[in-house]
Image: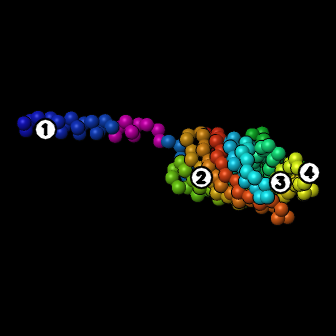
Amino acid sequence: MKKLLITAGMFLYSFSIFSQTKNEAEPSPLSYANHSKGDVSISLSGNRIMNDPFGSQFAGGVKIRMFLGKRVSFDSDLVFGKDYVHFGPGIIGLPLWILGTELGFSSDENDSFGWFLFKLAAMALSAEHIAFHFPLQSNTDISPYISVLRFKQLTVDDLNAASEDGFAHASFAAGLELNQYFKRFVLSPYAEYNISYDGYIRGFNFGINFGYYIPMKK
């Protein structure tokens, strides 16, 4: 009996050593606790739009994000549904930034004046929507964000509707997003409050983004 127990103990011990060796040999998963400048994500979104004085509806969209460092990103989105659309000028600025980086214009050395103006314009367009990223786990972060210049328009087919209903309203939005990374994919539920600067339209939006993450350092 004693020999049997010793044999069983040695077998279990050798099995544990094998398990540790296997784990150490496996590559560690990608960590998104710290992002890098130039990292990009592109997402598709499903959204529930609730606007006062109008009702609620479903809408689809696309979102672009570019990191300026490990904690800050410029974001922009385009969301559209039946008789509804909202977007920020960053939907133009961010592709300009990404295009410039891919073309090798990320260096600050020997920049021409024209390139300086290009970068300045892209930054101005992109900076209207900024997010801050705080890590919760190695592959999870939470990002509060604000958008200071979002354009929102609802088309109302109603003869009794006010003339303001057909206008594009400049608005402010503030929200919170939870980002869960699965290797190169990211799943991001969010909720936000938004209000037009003229006070005419206000509401809550919530939904989920599903996207692909492209790190600058590969």
Instruction: Give the distance between the C-alpha atoms of the residues marked 2 and 1, in whole angstroms.
Output: 51 Å
Q: Secondary structure at mark 2?
A: strand
Instruction: Give the distance between the C-alpha atoms of the residues marked 2 and 3, in whole angstroms.
Output: 24 Å
Query: Measured from the top left, where is residue 3 in percent x and y?
Result: 9, 35
Q: Earlier in the sequence, mark 3 or mark 4?
A: 3
Q: What residue range appears in magenta?
A: 20-28
* Circle 3 crowding by C-alpha within 10 Å: few under 14, some 14–19, many from 20: some
Q: Nearer the viewer, residue 81 or 163?
A: 163
Does residue 122 appear anywhere in the picture? no
Q: Quadrant of residue 144?
A: bottom right
The residue tagged 2 is: 178
Please state which amino acid type lies under the numbered disc 1: Ile
Query: Measured from the top left, where is residue 181 in percent x and y?
Result: 57, 44
Q: Nearer the viewer, residue 44 or 9?
A: 44
Residue at x-position 86% and y-position 49% = 156
Q: Secondary structure at mark 1?
A: helix
The residue tagged 4 is: 159
Does residue 2 appear anywhere in the picture? yes
Instruction: Determine if the magenta segment contains residue 203.
Output: no
The residue tagged 1 is: 6
Instruction: Determine if the magenta segment contains residue 25.
Output: yes
Q: Secondary structure at mark 4?
A: loop
Q: Earlier in the sequence, mark 3 or mark 1?
A: 1
Does the magenta stretch mainly form a helix, a strand or a loop? helix
Q: Secondary structure at mark 3?
A: strand
Camera-near label (2 vs 1) is: 2
The residue tagged 3 is: 151
Camera-near label (3 vs 4) is: 4
